[in-house]
Image (cartoon, rainbow, N blue to C red):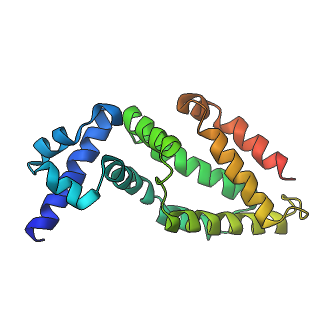
Amino acid sequence: MNQSEKKRARVLEVTEEMLQQYTISDITMDEIAQKAEVSKVTIFKYFESKDKLMNRVLHGTLTEMIDDITEIMESELGYEELYQALTALKLSRLDRMTPLLTQNIMTQYATNPDFFDMGSRDLQRQLAKKLFEKGRAEGKINSQYTDEELQMLLDVYDEGMKVVAPDFLLSHTDALTKMFLNALK
């Protein structure tokens, strides 16, 4: 690893540590630079803005789930069990995070339109399409709904979740799952 890569890695490491302990609004680029022992100019060279740095670190914590999600999607589980396994995976990942990190992810997700890049959005849509196909094949999703309509529903559902307090959402996951699955029949 060359010197530049080491600096970049250190900035990411320090930022991740800080996101576990402080809200995004309480973290400054000056503090990150000081703790990472790099200049603020160096940070901006790698990440362009505070939002892009936060997105990179927070997105990194979420992308660790991709292999697990893919494995679950390729399993022989039925549609409802598959949906519940995906929800359980997300909840177990959230349980391993500090409350502040979870809050930071939810805040950045709700307020920053660039939180997920196009590759992430495409992957989400591909996984959703597989889920729709499985649900239709098992008669759990009304076949009159097109993939486009179902994706629109997910987008509306997703946007609506951004305005609800994270703690409330987490405490009502079972009810939301049941309502969502029943609504598609």
Residue 91, given in percent of the width and then of the height, sits at 53, 44
- Quadrant for the N terminus, please: bottom left
Q: Is residue 31 above or below residue 168?
A: below
Residue situated in front as seen by the camera: 137 or 101: 101
Instruction: Locate residue 123 relative to residue 151 in the image: left or right.
Output: left
Instruction: Locate residue 107 relative to residue 45 in the image: left or right.
Output: right
Q: Residue at x 75, y 64 (%)?
A: 132
Q: Residue at x 89, y 65 (%)?
A: 143
Q: Is residue 111 above or below residue 167?
A: below
Instruction: Locate residue 35 relative to residue 174 in the image: left or right.
Output: left
Residue 37, given in percent of the width and then of the height, sits at 8, 48
Q: Residue furthest right?
A: 144
Q: Residue at x 68, y 54 (%)?
A: 83
Look at the image and tell me whether residue 92 can be seen: yes
Residue 45, given in percent of the width and then of the height, sits at 21, 60
Residue 180, given in percent of the width and then of the height, sits at 76, 46
Q: Quadrant of residue 165?
A: top right
